[in-house]
Image: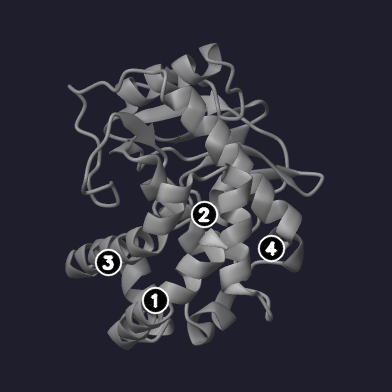
Amino acid sequence: MTAEGETAEGEVLVGGMANAGAVFRHGALVERPAPRTAHALHAHLRALHKQGFTAAPTPIRLTADGREQLTFISGEVALPPFPRWVMTETALGSVGSLLRRLHDASAAIAVDVSAEWPRSLADPAGGTMLCHNDVCPENVVFRDGHAAALIDFDLAAPGRAVWDVAMTARYWVPMLDPTSAAVLYPAGLDAPARLRILADGYGLSSQERAELPGVIEQATASCRAFVAGRVADGDPAYLQALSESGGWQRWDRLQEWLVTHHELFRAALLR
């Protein structure tokens, strides 16, 4: 998130839709609404640090009014419409590398099976590793053109590594038809080539590369269902976003584009 201005509560940080206007910085601390899984998530974040992954906030405490305090991570966070500097091939490869580092650390940490991890964007196949599930540009902190840290683990849930890569690819390649991509992304991005760069940066295995296009299609369907749920609940931010992005026709067009180009993406990954 980036700073928007000062209020009585502190410096407002902007970015994302779920907690808009409710995230504040107080010097070296960030205070924000605590997710339902805060206790388990805080334990996981501390365990990540013990595993050597320090590219995530450190939990400080939970407040009596249902908020959480975390360490502030300095750097640049891109907001839509996304600037060209955050869409360079170097930036893309570094996002893949950062995600791999997260997964290597997470794989060594037992998932708290007693926690009610959010299922809305979670891997339907499940898994034994806690995935981030929301590695969008607004949740990646950059320094000197390279991805340096991940923030906002609210949607973290158990899953497979390839699912988290697929969710990340949706935002960073991006895996969007040209009409949809033009709304928020710089022109001229080569989706097959960029998907390969992300997979290379991550170090994706041959088997996972072969699976990835299909998993991206599954992830896109999950994202559509997530939006549908928010719209059905009358969430004004999602109602507005759906209207401004072209409604459900945009989602139909996107899914058709992914299916049509499935083999092109698979060939680029396995070349």
Mark 3 vs 2, N-terminal side = 2
Q: Position of residue 227 (x, y in %)?
A: 28, 66
Secondary structure at badge 4 equals helix
The residue identified by callout 2 is 136
Q: Residues within 10 Å of mark 4 (few under 14, many from 20)?
A: many
The residue identified by callout 1 is 258
Q: Is residue 9 left or right of residue 233?
A: right
Residue drawn at (35%, 32%), measured in percent from left and top?
130
> Among all residues in the image, which is located at the extreme top?
50
Q: Is residue 67 left or right of residue 86?
A: left
Q: Position of residue 88 (x, y in %)?
A: 74, 61
- Mark carried by residue 87: 4
Residue drawn at (50%, 68%), measured in percent from left and top?
267
Asked if disc 3 and disc 4 are in contact, CB closer than 8 Å, the reply is no
- Mark carried by residue 103: none
Q: Residues within 10 Å of mark 1 (few under 14, many from 20)?
A: many
> Which kind of residue does numbered mark 1 sit on?
Leu
Q: Position of residue 204 (x, y in %)?
A: 51, 45
